[in-house]
Image: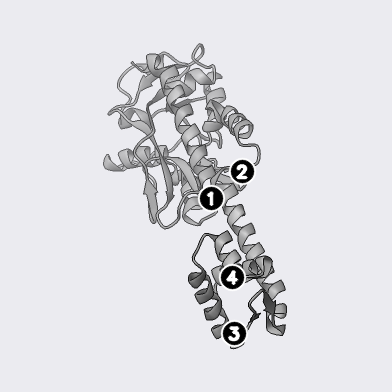
Amino acid sequence: MTLQQLHYFLTAIEFGTLSKAAEHLHISQPSLSEQILKLEHELGTHLFIRTNRRLILTEAGVRLAPYARAATTEAQRGYEAVQSVRELKGGVASFGTFGTAYQYFLADLIAEFRMTYPEVRLRLVGLNSSEVAQAVTEGEIEAGLVMLPVDAKNLVVSEPVWSTQIGYISASETRLVGSKDIHALLSAPLILSEASWHNRDPIRRLLKERARQVGANLEPLIEVEHQSTAFELASRGLGDLIATRPMLYHLGYHDRLMWVPVEPPAFEVFSFIHRADTAISSATRELMRLMRRYLDEVQRKYSHIER
């Protein structure tokens, strides 16, 4: 039996005749009769006694009716639940992003999303791109914004949505002199963040690979979890760090710390990711659309200092 047949059965009960039921359903009476006959055939019994004036339910029809109503009602509720998510009147937007996004724009983005879609719940996670990629791969969240490169098994990686150059940052003018290639970095008093993720962090992976190419191993002087901590330590002269100039300005350290580019040039490049075998919900897709706009605004805001 199908939901359509049950719906036709209930409509016939409501209107009392097949002709009136067919008129209400905007179908021909033969089409309606055919579906009810198929339902009766599958059940192996008649559901109506057909008279010239009105349909009369058989005992089988009486017993089927409450179950037919329950089935069609639940199906309608299921449809409405899906539509509420599609129309952003419910559901959850789940997304992962890198830690410094919290510094740039995340609170403003969340406030705007909640104001626009108050019935949609939000779940935002992530401190590191490797963590985000793992959560998306395992289906814990729908999508994420990550720094490339990232292990992309079963993931769709979008075109880059943000890129900014990384450099050597120090409070000491003396230590800023000269090219900041890997040879200079090997002897520098480096403070590196993302301690928990270590070599899975994209910047650390880049630096480690450059060190490996010259037969060396990069050993930081200090390792901390958060980049904001690394900036604070560098501002006190306890070491130097590798980071972007926009973050230097955004955190307000540009009057205490100086920036020079790493050589050869290296960039933080960010893309959206999602599982290749799973569709993104409307809520998460809208969150990504807003995030792309905020990323564009950050890029424009700091474009003058990167020239």
**Label 1 element class:** loop
Residue 24 in percent (x, y) is at 58, 60
Q: CA distance from mark 1 to mark 3?
A: 44 Å
10 Å crowding of disc 4: few (<14), some (14-19), many (20+):
many
Mark with earlier residue (3, 4): 4
Q: CA distance from mark 3 to mark 4?
A: 19 Å
Residue at image coords 43%, 26% = 296
Tag 1 and tag 4, C-beta contact below 8 Å: no
Question: Is residue 252 rendered to the left or right of residue 216?
Answer: right
Tag 4 and tag 2, C-beta contact below 8 Å: no
Mark with earlier residue (1, 2): 2
Q: CA distance from mark 4 to mark 2?
A: 38 Å
Residue 80 in percent (x, y) is at 61, 53
The residue under label 1 is which amino acid type?
Ile
> Is the N terminus in the top left, top right, bottom left or bottom right quadrant?
bottom right
Q: What residue is disc 1 on?
A: 141
The residue under label 2 is which amino acid type?
Lys
Q: For the residues carrying marks 1 and 2, which lies nearer the camera in this image?
A: 2
Residue 141 in percent (x, y) is at 53, 50
The residue under label 3 is which amino acid type?
Leu
10 Å crowding of disc 3: few (<14), some (14-19), many (20+):
few
Mark with earlier residue (1, 3): 3
Q: Nearer the viewer, residue 231 or 159?
A: 159
Q: For the residues carrying marks 3 and 2, which lies nearer the camera in this image?
A: 3
Q: CA distance from mark 1 to mark 4?
A: 50 Å
Q: Is residue 196 visible?
A: no
**Which of the numbered marks, if any, corresponds to residue 89?**
2
